[in-house]
């Protein structure tokens, strides 16, 4: 299976024609399209609807997770309904199997990496913050436990490792993702992980357990090649 993957489109209706042109060849180059979050700029339905129009017309099976921008306006449930009603597969603590390849995904959350990972100690507000991070890891655990395929791809918005956020300002590393996600991946095993969010990060890294992790933020792809809007993976 050939997978075209990208993230952080931050789509607005003004970009309709440009995006349509950028993705016109994806059907000839890939069997599946994966979007790793931040589909919209402000999480508004009037941003999502024309984007879905572009994606549906591609006639390529499409798998997505939401990102933090898609939550900005508090309308993520409405966005999810629009996505699902268009026939696009939304992963939110859920799994999807196609042609012998399993996809497990969730948005993920922040919290930091390794020894710097925030723990549930101190004020109630800190504990609530950490609880969200733990809940997202548990959602990924649930999704991965549903897969019965040997080939597995994990789709996240936030990064599971620090390596692929290198290039961002060190001060914001804790807001780029969480090692809790990598712990779940290593426990269940995967061929690779796709994520976005780190616009200035590195394209490739590995979890402690050796699973390949790929940052497919569109800004990162275009920094390497201006016309590049997705990356192709074989699994």
Image (spheres, rainbow, N blue to C red):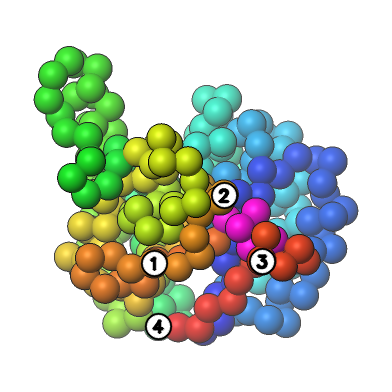
For the point 22% across and 34% down, the residue is 118
Q: Is residue 8 above or below residue 31?
A: above
Secondary structure of the residue carrying tag 4 is loop
For the point 71% across and 76% down, the residue is 27
Identify the residue position indicated by label 3 in the image: 224
Identify the residue position indicated by label 2 in the image: 199
Q: Is residue 103 in view from this perspective?
A: no
Q: Can you tell which of label 4 and label 2 is closer to the viewer?
A: 2
For the point 72% across and 68% down, the residue is 225
Q: Is residue 162 left or right of residue 199?
A: left
**3D distance between C-alphas at marks 3 and 4:** 32 Å
Question: What is the number of the mark on residue 205?
Answer: 1
For the point 22% across and 65% down, the residue is 208
Identify the residue position indicated by label 4 in the image: 100
Do residues under tags 1 and 4 come within 8 Å of each other at their CB atoms?
A: no
Nearer-N-terminus badge (4/2): 4
Front residue of 31/98: it is 31
**3D distance between C-alphas at marks 2 and 3:** 12 Å
**3D distance between C-alphas at marks 2 and 1:** 15 Å
């Amino acid at each position: 299976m050939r997978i075209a993957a990208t993230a952080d489109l931050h789509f607005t209706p003004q970009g309709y024609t440009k995006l349509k042109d950028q993705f016109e060849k994806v059907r000839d180059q890939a069997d599946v399209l994966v979007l790793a979050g931040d589909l919209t700029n402000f999480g508004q339905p009037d941003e999502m609807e024309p984007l879905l129009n572009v994606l549906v017309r591609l006639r390529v099976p499409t798998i997505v997770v939401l990102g933090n921008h898609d939550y900005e306006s508090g309308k993520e449930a409405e966005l999810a309904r629009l996505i699902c009603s268009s026939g696009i597969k939304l992963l939110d603590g859920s799994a999807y199997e196609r042609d012998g390849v399993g996809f497990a995904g969730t948005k993920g959350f922040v919290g930091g990496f390794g020894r710097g990972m925030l723990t549930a100690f101190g004020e109630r507000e800190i504990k609530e913050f950490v609880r969200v991070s733990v809940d997202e890891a548990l959602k990924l655990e649930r999704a991965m436990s549903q897969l019965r395929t040997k080939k597995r791809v994990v789709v996240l918005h936030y990064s599971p490792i620090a390596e692929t956020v290198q290039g961002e300002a060190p001060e914001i590393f804790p807001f780029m993702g969480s090692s809790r996600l990598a712990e779940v991946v290593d426990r269940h095993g995967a061929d690779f992980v796709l994520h976005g969010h780190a616009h200035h990060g590195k394209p490739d890294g590995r979890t402690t357990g050796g699973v390949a992790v790929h940052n497919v933020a569109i800004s990162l792809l275009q920094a390497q090649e201006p016309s590049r809007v997705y990356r192709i993976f074989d699994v």
